[in-house]
Image: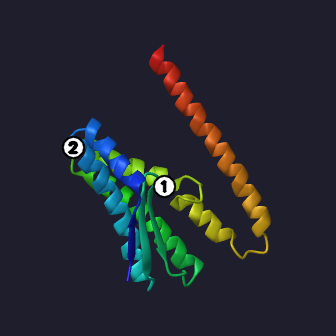
Amino acid sequence: MTKIKVKFSFLVFNALIFMFRDAEFISAFYIACISHEMGHIIALKITGGELKSIEFSCSGIKMTASPYTSIKSGIFVLMSGIAVNFILYTLMRLCGISGYMPLFNMAEGLFNLLPYSMLDGGAVLDLIAEGSIYEQTMKSVFFVIRIITAFVILFVLCDNAVQYFL
């Protein structure tokens, strides 16, 4: 049986979104998130895994599953949410749909590709390194990649903020 936990921070986050955004924005955001997580759940079922728990917080949705049967099945499950978002984005754009819906699917997919452990991209890197004879070296390299990624994101955000205010 899957345990579901909703933290207070998730409720606060939702209250803020509902206070400051319109219905189209909110529905597009949640549809992209739900589609992403459903991609993981379907892939987990395909690989014979079991969903143990789902936790909702202001930092996102965290799912805990039974251990992966192989690295390949783990990567398949982790990348399936991103794949669903990119497929939905592509289908919507091919159908001429614009607005928040395709935008949030693309953003959800790209965001989850970031190399941080709490996101799908970082979880894939951790899964690849785990148990390898080069595990410590790989973790060091991944740490450097995470630091560089943080600086690039910070630079882009600051550069955009400067351009916005000038």
Colouring: rainbow
Would you name the residue on which mark 1 appears?
112
Between 70 and 15, the one lying in front of the other is: 15
Instruction: Give the Cα distance between marks 2 and 1.
Output: 22 Å
Q: Residue at x 43, y 65 (%)?
A: 55
Name the residue at 41% across, 69% down: 54
Dot placed on the residue nearer the N-terminal end, 2 or 1: 2
Q: Count the marks: how many?
A: 2
Where residue 60 appears, as percent x and y from the top left, is: 44, 56
User: Is there a contact, CB below 8 Å, between mark 2 and mark 1?
Assistant: no
Which residue corresponds to the image point at 56% horizontal and 27% vertical from the top-left? 158
In the rendered view, does 120 fall on the left or right side of 8? right
Residue 98 seen in the current view: no
Please indicate whether residue 89 sits to the left or right of residue 132 in the image.
Answer: left
Q: Secondary structure at mark 1?
A: helix
Circle on res. 24: 2
Type of the residue with mark 2: Glu
- Percent position (x, y) of residue 111? 47, 50
Extreme residue toward the front, this view: 8
Amino acid type, callout 1: Asn
The image's mark for residue 127 is none
* Residue 5 visible here: yes
Q: Secondary structure at mark 2?
A: helix
